[in-house]
Amino acid sequence: MAKSVIVVRSVIESVLNHARFVHPKEGILLLKGRVKKDRVLVDEIEVPPLAVHSRNFANFPLHMLPIDFSIVGTAHSHPSGVLRPSIGDLNNFFGMIMIIAAYPYISERQMAVFDRDGRTLGYEIADREEDKQAKYQRNQTSRDTGS
């Protein structure tokens, strides 16, 4: 289970932009990054192949995904404005984390990160590449030393 999540600001902006673009339908994206023990770093997004978008769900055929171990989860939008996963979201959970962006998709305040049990996870935002690396390294060092 992820205990520490770092998301690069460009990923947050991409998720919000995608949600605004497909609204009033749900949108879905793949989250890419790195996992080390219980730490997840999200630094890229990818549009899943053959994604289906509707007013009530967004999905993609898992068998169409290439073998890519950098996929750490999914992000999708909730045009209803509800910022929590549905039963369908949890049943179709893929990866270690799920980001949900809720209408009106203005800022990270309309976003939340969840684990596969639907529990909200705290996350940090890295504004630049250097910040991302520094936070990831700092979190790794503090976890490894037990501080």
Image (cartoon, helix red, strand yellow):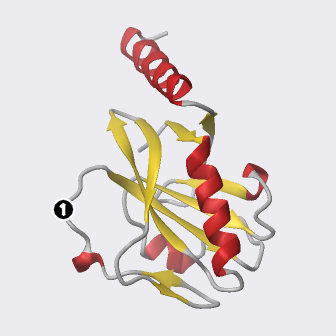
Q: Which residue is mark 1?
A: 67
Q: Quadrant of the N terminus?
A: top left
Query: Residue at (23%, 57%) from the top-left corner?
Result: 68
| Towards the viewer: 110 or 116 | 110
- Vertical relation: 1 (above or below) 140: below
x and y percent of residue 141 in the render?
Answer: 41, 13
| Towards the viewer: 109 or 15 | 15
Instruction: Point out the residue furthest to the left here.
Output: 67
Query: Residue at (59%, 57%) from the top-left corner?
Result: 14
- Vertical relation: 86 (above or below) 122: below
For the question of whether residue 84 can be seen, the reply is no
- For badge 1, the amino acid type reads Ile
x and y percent of residue 112 in the render?
Answer: 66, 54
Query: Residue at (30%, 49%) from the top-left corner?
Result: 70
- For mark 1, does the 10 Å Cα neighbourhood hold few (<14), some (14 to 19), or many (20 or more) residues? few
x and y percent of residue 94 in the render?
Answer: 38, 65
Query: Residue at (46%, 56%) from the top-left corner?
Result: 45
| Left-right relation of 79 to 58 | right
- Vertical relation: 20 (above or below) 146: below
For the question of whether residue 40 can be seen, the reply is yes
Number of marks in picture: 1
* Local SS, label 1: loop
| Left-right relation of 137 to 21 | left
Q: Quadrant of residue 30?
A: bottom left
- Vertical relation: 87 (above or below) 54: above
x and y percent of residue 132 in the render?
Answer: 51, 29
| Towards the viewer: 5 or 90 | 5
